[in-house]
Image: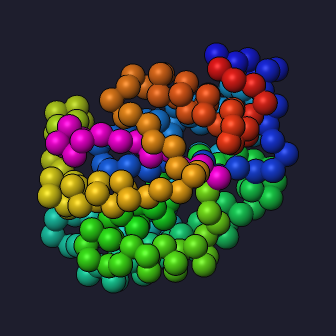
Amino acid sequence: MMDSKDAIPHKRGRLLVIEGIDGTGKTTFSRNLYDRLQKMGIPVILTFEPTMGTYGRRLRDSFSRTSRLDPKDELELFLKDRKEHVSTLIRPALKQGKFIVCDRYYFSTIAYQGARGIDPGHIREINEAVAPVPDVVFLLELAPEKALCRIRHGRNQIPNNFEELDYLRKVDAIFHLLKEPFIVRLDASQPPERLVDEAIKRISNPPFNFISSTV
C-alpha cells in the first residue's frame, strides 16, 4: 500500500464513478476507495446519487413497492437531482482539483431506467448535456442471483423495486453493453481490500495515470 508521501495527485480534478447492479457492494467500495485516497494524501470528496436534496428524496420515496413513479417522471427527477448535484458539488470540486468518488451516476440511470423501457441512448444524451463525463467508471460485476442473495442474507433486507431478479437481469444486460474505454470492470466477489487495491492499481497506470505511483 502507498504512503501519502508516495502519492502525487494530478493537478486536475478527477471524477471516479462507482456503478453496478444492487447488491454488488458499491457503497462499501466507494467508502473504502475514498478512505484509501485520503490516506494517500489526495484531496477527495465522497458523494452519491440520488442525493439527499429535494429531488433525490422524492426518488428515494419512489423506490418503495407502493409508490413507484412512472418511468418518465422518475427520469425527470433523476435529471433534476443530477443537475443540482453537478452545479453545487461536482463541477466546483473538479475546478478545485479534487478527486470525487461518486456512488452511482448517470450510468445507473441509463441501466435502470433503460430496463423500464426508456431508450438508453436518449437517457445518455440528455444526461451528458448537463453532467460531465467521468474520468473512470468502476463497474462492479456480480451475477444478479448472487447480488440478490447478498441483499436478502448479507444485509438481511427485503429487496425493493430496483432489486427484483428479472429487473436486475435487464439492468445487468444494459451495463454489459457499455464499452467505453474509461469503464473498468471489477469482479465484485473479491474481498473488499483486494477490490480497492485493484482499483488503485488501475488508475495509477496507463491508460489513466491519475496517480504517479502504483500499489
Measured as percent of width and height from the top left, residue 43 is found at: 75, 40
Measured as percent of width and height from the top left, residue 173 is found at: 28, 57
Q: Which residue does the image show at 58% across and 51% down from the upper left? A: 182
Q: Does the stretch in magenta take in 120?
A: no
Which corner quadrant holds the N terminus? top right
Instruction: Give the residues drawn in magenta, as a range.
Output: 135-148
Instruction: Answer above or below: position of 75 versus 85.
Output: below
Q: Nearer the viewer, residue 211 or 98?
A: 211
> In the image, is 113 to the left or to the right of 198?
left
Q: Nearer the viewer, residue 62 or 34?
A: 34
Observer able to see residue 61 = no
Q: Which residue does the image show at 48% across and 22% down from the upper left? A: 193
Q: Which residue does the image show at 16% across and 65% down from the upper left? A: 65
Measured as percent of width and height from the top left, residue 33 is found at: 56, 34
Q: Does the stretch in magenta take in 142?
A: yes
Q: Which residue does the image show at 22% across and 46% down from the upper left? A: 144
Instruction: Answer above or below: position of 75 versus 20.
Output: below
Instruction: Answer above or below: position of 86 versus 126.
Output: above
> In the image, is 9 to the left or to the right of 105?
right
Measured as percent of width and height from the top left, residue 68 is found at: 23, 73
Instruction: Answer above or below: position of 159 versus 35.
Output: below
Which corner quadrant holds the C terminus? top right
Q: How is the image coloured?
A: rainbow
Observer able to see residue 205 = yes
